[in-house]
Each structure stands twice: as C-alpha cells, then as structure tokens.
Image (cartoon, helix red, strand yellow):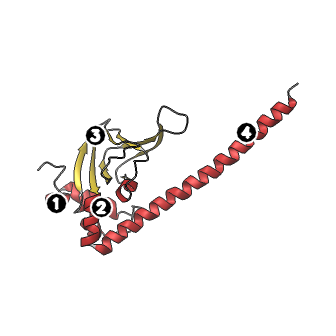
C-alpha cells in the first residue's frame, strides 16, 4: 500500500497532527475541537503532489470527488472565463486551505482547475471516506457538511456581489458609449 492509500491516522505522523491542527485552527473551515479534527483526519489519506501538477481539472466530469487540505506548498486555482482562452487566476492558496469541497458534495464537473505552484503535501478526503465519516461519526460528519455548506453559501454571496458590481460597470460603460455616439458628428 503506498502513501496515497494509507490513512493519515495509521501513520500518527507529523502530517496527521499538522492536518488536525489546521482543521481545528481559529478561522478554519469549521469550529472543530482538536479531537474532532483528529477524527476527520483519520478518514483522510496523504498525497504528495509535485510542483506544476494539475490535480483538479476544470470541466472534469469523470472526477470521483474529493477535497484536499493543503498541508505544505501552494495551489493556484484558475478558471477559464467567458471569451478567454487562457485561464484566469482566481487565487493562490497556502497551508491550511481547502480545495475541491464542491466536488466532495456534488457529482458535477469541476468548476475550476487546481495546480500546485510548488511541491505540495495534501490530506485528501474522498467522497467514499466522507460518506463513511457521516455514517460512523454522524455528529462530526454533519459539522463538516454544515461547514462546507456555509463556505459554499459565502462564495455564492461573494459572486452575487461581484455580479452586481459587474452589472453597474456594464451599465456605466453603456451610458458612456451612448454619450459618445450622441456627440459624434
């Protein structure tokens, strides 16, 4: 069994403790105690991902669904936007960040690509492991699910704010274009 298949809890390594501390840290995904975080981490597997590796690909419909907790390194999140052929960098994430949580809860194609900016170590929670967590530790599993839902709601609200701003900018640009056309001889 390679490290990708070995649960972090079997190792009781520094990676296990780092993952638990990151999940239980103030401002983390959810308000977990260190003991609850250790339970969640027990369902995760470590994965080393070399620099410049795209491990989540936007539009991938065959993905089996997983969430990654970044323990070391950095991840660049990118998306192809309307009328662009090159991806737009959405953000660069460091240790303690979660990526792929949408893919953990739905079976839709991935909404963005994630590429390691440096050699990275992640703790992976697969959909199957997440379902086992919910069945075996329902209180902790429901806390995790509620926290993921809150994070998704926050992103939805942020996108709605951006869309309103975009609409205002588009309207202002249209007014300027209309004024320029009226002034035209």
63 shown above or below 138: above
For marks 3 and 2, the one nearer the N-term is 2
Image x and y of residue 35, in percent: 26, 70
x, y (%) of residue 32? 34, 69
Residue shown at 37% from the left, 42% from the top = 57
Label 1 packing within 10 angstroms: few (<14), some (14-19), many (20+): few
Q: Secondary structure at mark 3?
A: loop
Q: Is residue 97 visible?
A: no
Q: CA distance from mark 1 to mark 2?
A: 13 Å
Left or right: where 152 falls relative to 177? left
Q: Quadrant of residue 8?
A: bottom left
Residue corresponding to mark 4: 173
- The residue wearing badge 1 is 12
111 or 22, nearer to the observer: 111
Q: Which residue is mark 3?
A: 119
Report how far apart the C-alphas of labels 2 and 4 lie in the structure: 48 Å
User: Which element carries disc 1, helix, strand or loop?
Assistant: loop
Which disc is residue 21 wearing?
2
Q: Residue at x 59, y 55 (%)?
A: 160
Which numbered disc, 2 or 4, marks the residue that appears first in the sequence? 2
Residue drawn at x 70%, y 48% is: 168
């Amino acid at each position: 069994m390679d490290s990708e298949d070995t649960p972090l809890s079997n190792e009781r390594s520094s990676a296990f403790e780092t993952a638990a501390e990151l999940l239980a840290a103030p401002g983390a995904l959810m308000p977990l105690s260190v003991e609850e975080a250790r339970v969640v981490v027990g369902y995760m597997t470590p994965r080393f991902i070399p620099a410049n590796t795209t491990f989540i690909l936007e539009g991938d419909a065959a993905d089996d669904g997983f969430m990654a907790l970044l323990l070391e390194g950095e991840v660049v999140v990118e998306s192809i936007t309307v009328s662009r052929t090159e991806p737009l960098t959405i953000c660069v994430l460091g240790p303690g960040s979660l990526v792929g949580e949408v893919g953990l809860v739905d079976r839709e194609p991935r909404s963005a690509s994630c590429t390691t900016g440096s050699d990275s170590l992640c703790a992976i929670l697969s959909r199957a492991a997440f379902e086992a967590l919910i069945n075996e530790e329902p209180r902790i599993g429901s806390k995790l699910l509620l926290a993921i839902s809150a994070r998704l709601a926050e992103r939805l609200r942020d996108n709605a704010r951006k869309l309103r701003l975009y609409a205002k900018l588009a309207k202002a640009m249209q007014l300027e274009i209309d004024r320029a056309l009226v002034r035209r001889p």
